[in-house]
Amino acid sequence: MELDDVFYLGKRPTTLRLVLGLMEDAETSLETYRWAVPALMRSFDTNDFQLYKYVADVFNRKGLMPYAPGKEKEDDSTETTTDKKMVMNPLVLQSKVKMVLEELMNLKDAKGEKLFCQKNHWWAVFRLFVEHQVGNIRENRYKEFIDLINTIHLDHVNAELDMTTLSNITQDIYRFPFKKWEYNIPEDASSRWMTAYHRMYIIADMLDRILIEKGF
């Protein structure tokens, strides 16, 4: 993350230092979101994982959800996530899961291309569904996960979901809880592997926030 890097906002040159400063000093969530967008796009363009995490940390410190400007985090005294899962009937669950995945499928990178675009990106979805107990999905229950996805009838899927690809999650670091991925990066990881990891991490992080926003 080079703070004095110059890039363009429209036709106006600016520095990363200025953009991040304006984001941190913003007094409203909408203003924070406004300055976070070019910073995030910069992280996608340059595969700057450190910059992406920095932006996420600023949102966390401010108690904001990056994908819902103007909304604050729910008070801890409200109904717990576990309680919501217990009373959620199958039709409500399917509806909410469909909204979550359609939002994920529509996310784009800095080049305007779909962020979720490969079969193995379903690893991130499976991992986060296990951790959020979406549909009571558990470790290694790949068929139950696939059945859940099939029941919601997504209008569009960016990459096919199949048992063979999904079960291969056991061969990579994505079998670990999401928060532990960065601690299990191979020491000999190639630049190509790190580029793929960076995208997978962003997909998982965005999905994590979307799930929380939708009440999972």
Image (cartoon, grey):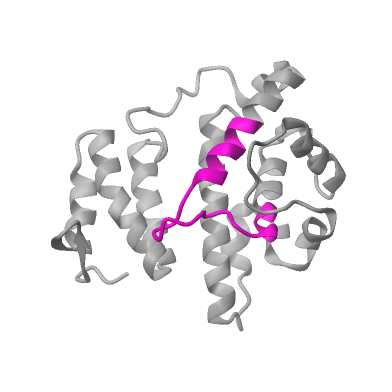
* Residue drawn at point x = 64 percent, y = 36 percent: 155
| Quadrant location, the N terminus | bottom left
Q: Position of residue 41 (x, y in %)?
A: 35, 57
* Residue drawn at point x = 50 percent, y = 18 percent: 77
Q: Residue furthest left?
A: 12
Who is closer to the viewer here, 189 or 144?
144
Q: Position of residue 109 (x, y in %)?
A: 44, 56
Please say whether residue 173 is one of the residues in the magenta stretch. Answer: no
Q: Position of residue 175 (x, y in %)?
A: 73, 58
Please say whether residue 103 is one of the residues in the magenta stretch. Answer: yes
Which stretch appears magenta? 98-123
Q: Position of residue 75 (x, y in %)?
A: 45, 22
| Quarter holding residue 98 | top right
* Residue drawn at point x = 56 percent, y = 78 percent: 192
| Quarter holding residue 212 | top right
* Residue drawn at point x = 61 percent, y = 39 percent: 101
